Structure formats: structure tokens, C-alpha cells
């Protein structure tokens, strides 16, 4: 979308975030950065087709900075991420749909922002990395200016509300965290036993049947995952990291 639309939606989001003038300026600066970089560096490729995981990595940077109290850096990262989210709401193709893309951008610029809808969507946000990922992967581009603008406001409000949310984890997540720590400690004991047992078995077999060295080597390679498995669900790790735990 046009940079004026980015800024207009950004101002509406900043009101929901309750930013003071300086922090609002930092947030808007982040929103403007991708387009300014494209204009300044001719070799930079268009960012309209950026992958959701690339946006998620920027969202993670914003969340980590928020947890450490670096609100300036957090808002700048959040602004960049929301810029990419907003651009993904508009249909894009290099040739056939370029005119449609430009028309949607021009029309959206003259539309009125759904401010009340932004406020309601902001309140629906869940403080969860799983929630943010589901939002990023559910974005679908539209050739309808009204729908594109509404979707952009919807997705931006949800992502911003998820990042700038409670830094205190919910009770059920803390309980899962304690269970995960106990499981990890238990798995470390099991892993030490397994490593010792496998080492003895391999040494014994190597002495008795040295001609099967290649088979032993393959078996040892297949056993490596046991050394690195922590016993904790990776999704739980992400949820814990969203609150600065783990």
C-alpha cells in the first residue's frame, strides 16, 4: 500500500498502544522504513512477496525488545513487520495484476479507516506466538480496495495487540513450564544412562565382531538424536520464549 496509508493505519494502531509522541514517531519510522529503503537502494527487491516466517522473525525481535524494556527498538521492529503484513493484503503480480495492485492502492488511500473495528480487533488479540503465526499464514491478498484495507487493519491490530500484551505468562503456561523442567531433568538422567549403555554395547560388539564396524558406525549415527532430544515440546518452548522464559 501507499506510504500514506501505512502511516494512517499506524497512527490508529499507536492510539490503541497508548504511545507518547516520541514512541509514536519511532513506530511510524519503522512503518515507513521498507518503502524508503526500496526508493533509496535500487537493487533492493520488492518486499511484497515476503514469506510469513521472515515477518515472524521481525515480530520476534519486536517482542524480545519489548520484554527487555527497549520500547524504541521494539516499536521500530514492529513497524517494519506491520508494513510487510499490510502490503501482503493487496494483490500483487509483476505483470498482469500490477495495474490492479496500483488501483487498489490508489483507491484505499481515499477510503475512511475503520477506527472502531481496529479498536475491537486489537482487544481480540492473544498473547501467543502460535496466534501470531496463524495470523501471518492466514493473510490472503485482495483486489478489492475496501476488503484489502479492512483486512490490513484487522491483521495489523491483531499482531500489534499480540506483541504489546502482557509480559506475565498465564498460570497454565507456568504449570506447563514447571512440568517441562521436571521432564527435562528426568530425560537428562535417562539420556546419561542410555549413552553409557550404548557405549558399552558398541564397545563389546566391536571387540567381538570387528568386521561389522560400518554397521556400528551407522547405528551410532542413528542414536545421535537421543543426545539432543530435550523432552520438551518445541511449541511449548516458543510459547515460553514469547514471555522470556525457557
Image (cartoon, grey):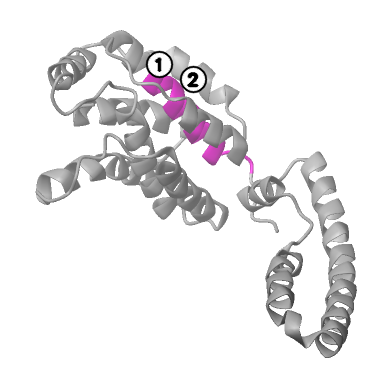
- Say if mark 2 contacts mark 1, CB within 8 Å: yes
The residue carrying mark 1 is 115
Q: Position of residue 56 (x, y in %)?
A: 47, 43
| 152 part of magenta stretch | yes
Q: Nearer the viewer, residue 134 or 223?
A: 223
Give the mark count.
2
> Residue at (81%, 41%) from the top-left corner?
171
Left or right: residue 36 compared with residue 205:
left
| Residue 51 placement: quadrant | top left
Q: Residue 8: x, y in percent?
A: 28, 26
Relative to 60, say whether 31 is above or below.
above
Which quarter of the picture shows residue 125?
A: top right
Mark 1 Cα-neighbour bin, 10 Å: few <14, some 14–19, many ≥20: some
Does 151 sit left or right of 219 as displayed?
left
The residue lying at 45 percent from left, 13 percent from top is 116
- The percent coordinates of residue 119 (x first, y second) are 49, 20
Against 150, is 158 above or below? below
Q: Is residue 219 left or right of 153 when viewed as pictured? A: right
Which of these two is toward me, 57 or 195?
Answer: 195
- Viewer-side residue, 190 vs 66: 190
Q: Which mark is residue 119?
A: 2
| Predominant SS of the magenta segment | helix
Percent x, y for residue 246?
Answer: 70, 59
Density class for disc 2 (Cα within 10 Å; few <14, some 14-19, many ≥20) is some
Is residue 60 magenta-colored? no
Which span of residues is magenta-colored?
A: 151-166
Q: Residue at x 81, y 40 (%)?
A: 172
> What label sits on residue 175 in the rendered view?
none
- Observer able to see residue 116: yes
Callout 1: helix, strand or loop?
Answer: helix
Quadrant assignment for the N terminus: top left
Quarter of image, res 183: bottom right
Amino acid at each position: 500500500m501507499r506510504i500514506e496509508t501505512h502511516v494512517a493505519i499506524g497512527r490508529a494502531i499507536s492510539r490503541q498502544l497508548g504511545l507518547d509522541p516520541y514512541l509514536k514517531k519511532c513506530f511510524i519510522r519503522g512503518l515507513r522504513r521498507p518503502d524508503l529503503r526500496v526508493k533509496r537502494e535500487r537493487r533492493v527487491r520488492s518486499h511484497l512477496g515476503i514469506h510469513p516466517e521472515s515477518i515472524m522473525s521481525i515480530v520476534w525481535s519486536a517482542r524480545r525488545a519489548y520484554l527487555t524494556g527497549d520500547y524504541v527498538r521494539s516499536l521500530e521492529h514492529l513497524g517494519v513487520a506491520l508494513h510487510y503484513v499490510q502490503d501482503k493484503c493487496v494483490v500483487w503480480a509483476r505483470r498482469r495484476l500490477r495495474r490492479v495492485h496500483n488501483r487498489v492502492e490508489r483507491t484505499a488511500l481515499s477510503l475512511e479507516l475503520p477506527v472502531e473495528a481496529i479498536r475491537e480487533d486489537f482487544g481480540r488479540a492473544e498473547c501467543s506466538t502460535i496466534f501470531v503465526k496463524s495470523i501471518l499464514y492466514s493473510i490472503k491478498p485482495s483486489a478489492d480496495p475496501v476488503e484489502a484495507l479492512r483486512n490490513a487493519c484487522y491483521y495489523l491490530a491483531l499482531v500489534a495487540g499480540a506483541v504489546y500484551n502482557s509480559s506475565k505468562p498465564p498460570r497454565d503456561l507456568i504449570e506447563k513450564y514447571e512440568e517441562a523442567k521436571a521432564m527435562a531433568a528426568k530425560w537428562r538422567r535417562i539420556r546419561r544412562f542410555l549413552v553409557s549403555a550404548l557405549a558399552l554395547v558398541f564397545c563389546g560388539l566391536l571387540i567381538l565382531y570387528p568386521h561389522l564396524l560400518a554397521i556400528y558406525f551407522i547405528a551410532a549415527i542413528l542414536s545421535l538424536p537421543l543426545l539432543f532430544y530435550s523432552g520438551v515440546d518445541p511449541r511449548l518452548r516458543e510459547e515460553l520464549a514469547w514471555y522470556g522464559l525457557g
